[in-house]
Amino acid sequence: MEAIDVSDEKEEVNECPFCGTNVEETDEYCIECGTDLKEQETCNY
Ligand SMILES: [Zn+2]
């Protein structure tokens, strides 16, 4: 059987701030655009 679980929300899912793709919380980079999903603090330069 092929079941597509769409409304199954078990783990927290983050969204890419760049393309809006749903990415896992453990993902460091977006699987779509490769945007850095890690905590981005203010760059001090
Ligand atoms: Zn993305």
Image: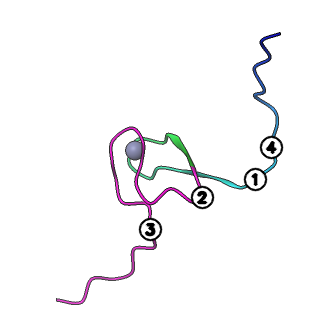
- Does the magenta-highlighted stretch encompass residue 41? yes
Disc 2 crowd rating (10 Å Cα; few below 14, some 14-19, many 20+) is some
Q: Is residue 17 above or below residue 19?
A: below
What residue did someone put label 3 on?
38
Q: How many marks?
A: 4
Judge whether 29 appears above or below 4 on screen: below
Q: Secondary structure at mark 1?
A: loop
Q: Assess whether mark 4 and mark 2 are in contact (beta carbons under 8 angstroms).
A: no
Counting from the top left corner in percent of width and height, residue 16 is at 47, 49
Residue 17 at x, y percent in the picture: 44, 53
> Quadrant holding ligand 1?
top left
First in residue order: circle 2 vs circle 3 = 2
Between the residue at mark 2 and the residue at mark 4, the CA separation in whole angstroms equals 13 Å
Amino acid at dot 3: Lys
Give above or below for 39 relative to 20: below
Mark 4, Cα crowd under 10 Å, few <14 / some 14-19 / many 20+, is few
For the residues bearing labels 1 and 2, Cβ distance under 8 angstroms: yes
Residue that badge 2 annotates: 25
Callout 1 amino acid = Glu
Residue drawn at x 82%, y 36% as measured from the top left? 8
Q: Is residue 6 magenta?
A: no
Asked which secondary structure carries label 4, the reply is loop
Q: Can you identify the residue that label 4 sits on?
A: 9
Question: In whole angstroms, how far apart are the C-alphas of marks 4 and 1?
Answer: 6 Å
Amino acid on which the number 2 mark rests in the picture? Glu
Identify the residue at horizontal 36%, vertical 60% (top origin).
36
Q: Picture quarter containing residue 25?
A: bottom right
Majority SS type along the magenta span:
loop
